[in-house]
Image (tube, grey):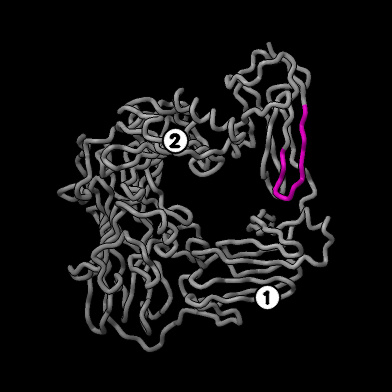
Amino acid sequence: MKRIFAPLLFLFSFTVIAQAPNVPTEYFDDPLQVPLALSGTFGELRSNHFHSGLDIKTQQREGLPVYASAEGFVSRINVAHYGYGKAIYIQHPNGYTTVYGHLKNFSPKIEEYIKKLQYQKESYEVQVYPEASELPVERRELIANSGNTGGSGGPHLHYEIRDGEQRPMNPLMFGIELEDTRAPIVSGVFVYPKGENAHVNGSAQRQKLRLIPQQDGSFRAEKIDACGEIGFGINAVDQLNAAPNHNGVYRIETSANGEKLFQANFEIFSFSETRHLNQLIDYDYYARNNSRIQKLFVEPSNPLSIYSDVSNQGLLNVKDSLSYNYTIRVSDFSGNERIVTIPIEGKHQNDIKEDPSEITDFYVPANAGAQFEGNGIDVYIPKNSLYQDASLDISFEDEKVILHEDVIPIHTNITIGFDLSKYQPEDREQMFIARLNKWGNPNYSTTTKDGERFTTKTRNFGTYTLGRDTQAPRVVPVNFKDGQWISGNKNLKVKISDDLSGIKSYRATVNGKFILMEYEYKQNLLTHDFADGVVTDTENQLKIEVIDNVGNTTIFESTFFRK
């Protein structure tokens, strides 16, 4: 399968498309038989992770046929409320695995297989690893229909290719055809004084540079005066021809006076490292501005494997009285490039505006961890939870801890504990630990209750407090009424919701027999498909039990009739 190339206007291009060695480019077919348009590309910077595949648009609708990219067998099926929703994993003879996520439903043989398991377990959420002989598939065989299940923001197919170690790889390396004549978009470049006594334009603080567009499509920054070790960061996205979405770039390279300093390639990563994206980006800037600056240098605590040809951690050591020409080259997979050049004059200055760093009473060394407590609340930060040493702002108030701002990334869980000994056991049943959002409203934080002590584990700083939920969930029928004949209905739909702690579980029966109801949390909707064949009586007693995260329970009962 050949890739599509097109002439480039006012852009730069590679002479050869970048490609990982020994990757089969003729093996995998497109999983959808429609013109391909992407809403997401491999390696895109997402919240706390890299995007692990392609998000393929499905013409703003659900139900498009999804086909196996190559022969193999279904090695895993996962049905979940969140994440990939309904997902299929196919193991191929060449050692690769393809993944298809956010599906609406499966092909008849796979649907029959998974429905049987769901009824056995009496659960919508299931995960199973079939044997190779159970669900073999042929190349281009229908395996599912596209949907919007799980954590999808709209109808699309999430598609991955993984290697033998289950590491996601960039599917574009395998020969998927996409028309792309647009160069990446650069919206900002930043400079960071990093070394001791380093400074830029008389300051030791991060600065945004003014970029001047050039006639050839490149940018040139205004000259900066600097001295010492400095690094750079960039706001950059890519845009394909078929869609306006801002996607991830494929490669970023930097050099100074022709000597290479840094390269980041979005070709492959492991799921175990994906959260280290928070070291790739300027997390503080992202938290305050909702914009991701990708650092073009490698922090000492950054273990990501996406880097190559890195010299001096990607930092430039600027000497007094010397001149430098720093170049950033941002590329997409089709070879389109955007180039930024930054002239630098080495100039030592004595009167430097320092980067403010307040020392507090709550100092946490990254390699040792710490514990703090006050007002019956304790905070435990294990060793290596933080990437760098930090002085935190912590305030213990009545039943509330203000735990810094969420401007420092946490890699592994910290623990927050509350003493509830002053409350009666019956009062504690409806209480939980909540994290206050930016509007001051409480959001349930998974709470472990051990008698008079409540704890929660989290990877976000912020304000945590005790909440109380006294209201049971709401259950409202959608397409039927009590006592109604619904012989013409293909399904049974019910809305469930909870205002505070959130839905924990639900279970539905008809005439005392379990019925499967799919939960679409984005719409608060439970749906039973009568095609399951478990509702066979004329008169039917429906019972749905819904429980929230503190145990408040609603039991909804209704009678309906069917022929």
- Where disc 1 sits, the SS reads strand
Tell me the residue at 64%/32% (across/down). 526
Q: Is residue 552 magenta?
A: yes
**Quadrant of the image containing the C terminus:** top right
Residue 371: x and y in percent read: 61, 76
Using a 10 Å C-alpha cutoff, classify the residue at mark 2 as few (fewer than 14 neighbours), some (14 to 19) or many (20 or more). Answer: many
Which of these two is toward me, 74 or 204? Answer: 74
Can you name the residue that lies furthest to the left here?
Answer: 15
Q: Is residue 333 magenta?
A: no
Q: In the figure, is residue 425 to the left or right of 133?
A: right
Magenta stretch, residue numbers: 546-557
What's the distance in space between the residues labelled 1 and 2, CA to CA?
47 Å
Residue 420, quarter of the rendered image? bottom right
Tell me which secondary structure the magenta stretch mostly adopts: strand
| Vertical side of 219 occupied by 405: above or below | below
Residue 455: x and y in percent read: 67, 63
Residue 163: x and y in percent read: 31, 47
Can you name the residue that lies furthest to the top here?
Answer: 563
Which of these two is toward me, 197 or 143? Answer: 143
- Where disc 2 sits, the SS reads strand
Q: Which residue is mark 1?
A: 373
| Vertical side of 540 occupied by 453: above or below | below
Q: Which residue is mark 2?
A: 156
Tell me the residue at 62%/29% (across/down). 516
